[in-house]
Amino acid sequence: MSLGDAWTGPVLVTGTDTEIGKTVVTAAVAAAAQAAGLRVAVVKPGQTGTATGEPGDVDSVTRLAAPLTGRTLASYPDPLAPLAAARVADLPPLELYNAVDAIREEADKHDLVLIEGAGGLLVPMGLRPSGEPWTVADLAVSLGAPAVVVARAGLGTLNHTALTLEALERRAVPAGVVIGAWPAEPELVHWLNLSELVPNLLGAVPAGAGGMDPGVFRRSAPGWLTPALYGVLDDWRAWAEE
């Protein structure tokens, strides 16, 4: 699967860090794909921090993009990595192959299944039957799914993004990058980082997009993404000059 092909089936959405914009990028891809006529499901394997009573990530994606299906496989009250949150709350950790089966079940009924990870690529998500921890990288390998890596626009992003892409490449997982929050008034560092990321870039979502009216969000999303993610952005030079 190349960066130019439209991505179908299970697709992992991961990030270079936490609080990076994965949920809004997931919503943008869901909105663009549905506008293109696809049946879209969004699956969150492990949601943490639910003790506050605030909406989970799938709720946020549903509000912005209204995918056909939204599903959370396991929720834990503490705002920790899912495996740690399960242990602290004395709740059953998510088992890898249960997650794989649940996602394949959705893939049988949808054209695109977006799997939103938690934190970065190698955060412990749950346990294998052997008792060993697993990560969303393991999930991507088990599903044969490509990965969207959500990255920051500013200082430090090149190293973090390169490390994440290298870890995916070592596992033979195809990957591209979406900038999770492109600033309204970019500075030199943002433009320089953009130029370095362009060979792997699949999109750039504007900062604050998650606060948009859902109708505006859905109409705007295709303009933030390349055709691989069902957008219309095909010339980064023209985009940069707008």
Image (cartoon, grey):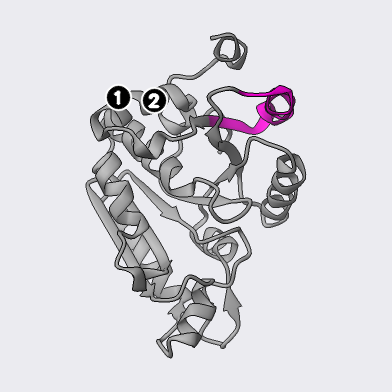
**Element at label 1:** helix
Side of 193 where 19 appears, left or right: left
Three-letter residue code for mark 2: Pro
Estimate the spatial distance between the alpha carbons at disc 2 and disc 1, rounded to whole Å. Answer: 7 Å
- Does residue 74 appear to the left or right of 88 in the view shown? left
Q: Quadrant of residue 103?
A: bottom left
Report x, y in % for residue 169.
Answer: 70, 50
Camera-side mark, 2 or 1:
1
Is residue 178 positioned above or below 239 on the image?
A: below
Q: Is residue 108 left or right of residue 126?
A: left
Give me the disc on residue 101.
none
The secondary structure type at the circle numbered 2 is: helix
Whole-percent x and y of residue 149?
58, 45
Report x, y in % for residue 10. 42, 51
Q: Main secondary structure of the magenta part?
A: helix
Given the image, on which type of amino acid does mark 1 rest? Arg
Q: Which residues are magenta?
A: 186-203
Question: Is 191 contained in the magenta span?
Answer: yes
Instruction: Write down the residue under mark 2.
Output: 222
Label 1: how many residues lie within 10 Å, few (<14), some (14-19) or many (20+)?
Answer: some
Residue 24 in view here: yes
* Residue at 26%, 48% in the rendered image: 62
Give the mark count: 2
Give the residue at x 51% y 52%. Answer: 145
Is residue 208 positioned above or below 171 on the image?
A: above
The residue that mark 1 highlights is 219
Label 1 near label 2: C-beta < 8 Å? no
Q: Is residue 88 above or below residue 3?
A: below
Q: Where is residue 83 shown, x and y percent of the image?
A: 52, 78
Residue at image point 55% right, 36% down = 178
Residue closer to the observer: 10 or 92: 92
